[in-house]
Image (cartoon, helix red, strand yellow):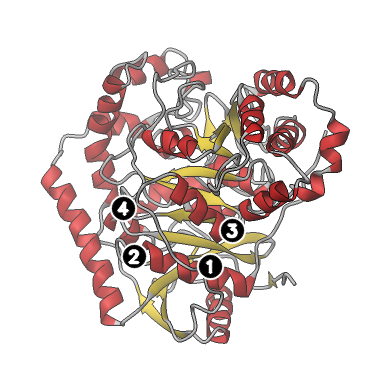
Amino acid sequence: MKRFWLFISGIFMLGGLIIAGLAFLIVLNQNPIPAKRLTTNMEHMNTVIDKQLSGIKPEVIKGKEHLIKEKSIQELQENIAAGTITYEDITAYYLYQIKETDQIKSGTNAISEINPNAIHEARKCDESKDNNQQMFGMPILIKENVNTNNMPTSAGTVALKNFIPKDNAPFVNQLKENGAIILGKTNLSELSYWLDKDAPSGFSAKNGQTLNPFKPGELSPSGSSSGSAVAMATDLAATSIGTETVGSIVSPASANSVVGFKPSRQRISNEGVVPISSRLDTVGPITRTVEDALITYNAATENQIKISLDKNYLKDKKIGIGIESGSENDVFVDNLTQSLQAMGVKVIQVEVDSSQIDADFIMKNDFEASFTEYLTEYDTPIKTLNELIAFNKRDTHSRIPYGQDLLQKSLNFKHRDNKKAEKIVKQAEDELNKLLDEYQLNALVSMNEKNVLLSAVAGAPELSVPFGLIDEIPVGATFYCAPDMDEELIKIGYSFEQHTELREIPSLKKD
């Protein structure tokens, strides 16, 4: 039975406790959320939904809700096999969920676009349901910085709000080849946080403000994959995809009590993704369970993870809890230590020093070149970073209400040095491997996105698993291993999840 923890001591607060090189990324998560929802696309999306639901009786879908609501991919496929639901039922259920809980005045605004062919694709799946692919017929949401050939790919910008690429990103084609239904796209922190340090997490000029469903308008949804995480928390699809440069999968997953898996870099292709740094950017699933993350990952790449999942895998393993001196939440560390020890894990505390890993330099070094390459390759309406900045300046109120300081700094960056950037990546990899080897650890673990700087820059895998609440705020236990130890990380995360079962489900309001 699910255990609910309401911790009674101090909240772990971000901000000044974070090293300078990464501070702007994480502090952004804590910027005040606008009191108003600020959405711009609700009417359009509901029109697209209504057109697809025409002829489908809502009472029929409501009658099958207990067979779909909060179900894992495996449970949905079992219900399909039993003949109690269809792929059309599943897709229609999620479209109703989006319309009735997300795209309303009091909704969380996680969704930015709807695939106009979703129901049609679901019906085609029903016509050929003899299929052994685990993702077959499963509706999936994609972050709106990923190319799709029938919906806009704007990265949240007004300048690209009508840009529809000719081709899908390769991993999107891989998902479709494995039978997935692209249900729609999710809002994000505009340009994956690379706009202005004063912008709140989950805000984009094209789509407005995504809200955290646990405390809407009060608690940050985190980001930059805000919409994907909120969509999973509020049951808007079977699974979803986010992207991460530093922390942007595991941070929103933790903040919304869902699972975030950032695989080792390039295990899933980042081609066709609007970049911050092609050197660091990584695609990964955000889901409700670790097993769903594994299924989604395997459907998006040819670099398969073929493992057996074992609830007791953690027994006799050695895990290091990453500590930054004076900055830890004692309640989190104490409860995590007790939980791991109860599973038969040897637990030690390990001091993690990321102060010399200058991710800020890498992103400023890489952004203009990576972004311009994307604009050129996919023939977007704007062709350069300078052109985007000038476009935004022509209507600052609606296009850049929080400014565009990070864009301007990237344009004016005078110290580009790719060799230095690669040296920083190698330094992060060496530091991470040194920690794991010195203490003979199977993995490290920290609260939320803390201490993931090493793994993010090193290109190593990360997996955030829900770990209950602290003062009614969701927290995650984020595990990370050495590069290309993805199989080990999934086994560890699954075992931890099965023993703790601390995912929280928010209460949703309807207008």
Q: Residue at x 26, y 78 (%)?
A: 437
Q: Is residue 257 left or right of residue 302?
A: right
Q: What is the quadrant of residue 352 in the picture?
A: bottom left
Query: Could you tell which of marks 2 and 3 lies nearer the N-terminus?
Result: 3
Say what amino acid the circle numbered 2 marks.
Met
Instruction: Give the image location of residue 214, x and y in percent.
Output: 69, 51
C-alpha distance separating marks 1 and 2: 15 Å
User: Mark 3: which secondary structure?
Assistant: loop
Say what amino acid the circle numbered 3 marks.
Thr
The quarter of the picture where the C terminus appears is top right
C-alpha distance separating marks 4 and 1: 32 Å
Query: Could you tell which of marks 3 and 1 lies nearer the N-terminus?
Result: 3
Query: Could you tell which of marks 4 and 2 lies nearer the N-terminus?
Result: 4
The circle drawn on residue 485 is 2
C-alpha distance separating marks 4 and 2: 26 Å
Query: Could you tell which of marks 3 and 4 lies nearer the N-terminus?
Result: 4
Q: Residue at x 37, y 31 (%)?
A: 274
Say what amino acid the circle numbered 4 marks.
Gly
Tell me the residue that label 4 is attached to: 21
From the viewer's perspective, is residue 421 above or below residue 59? below
Q: Nearer the viewer, residue 72 or 190?
A: 72
Find out whether the residues at labels 4 and 1 contact each other: C-beta distance under 8 Å. Answer: no
User: Mark 1: which secondary structure?
Assistant: helix
The circle drawn on residue 289 is 3
Disc 4 versus disc 2: nearer the observer: 2
From the viewer's perspective, is residue 34 above or below residue 448? above
User: Mark 2: which secondary structure?
Assistant: loop
- For mark 2, does the 10 Å Cα neighbourhood hold few (<14), some (14 to 19), or many (20 or more) residues? some
- For mark 3, does the 10 Å Cα neighbourhood hold few (<14), some (14 to 19), or many (20 or more) residues? many
Q: Residue at x 54, y 43 (%)?
A: 240
Query: Could you tell which of marks 1 and 2 lies nearer the N-terminus?
Result: 2
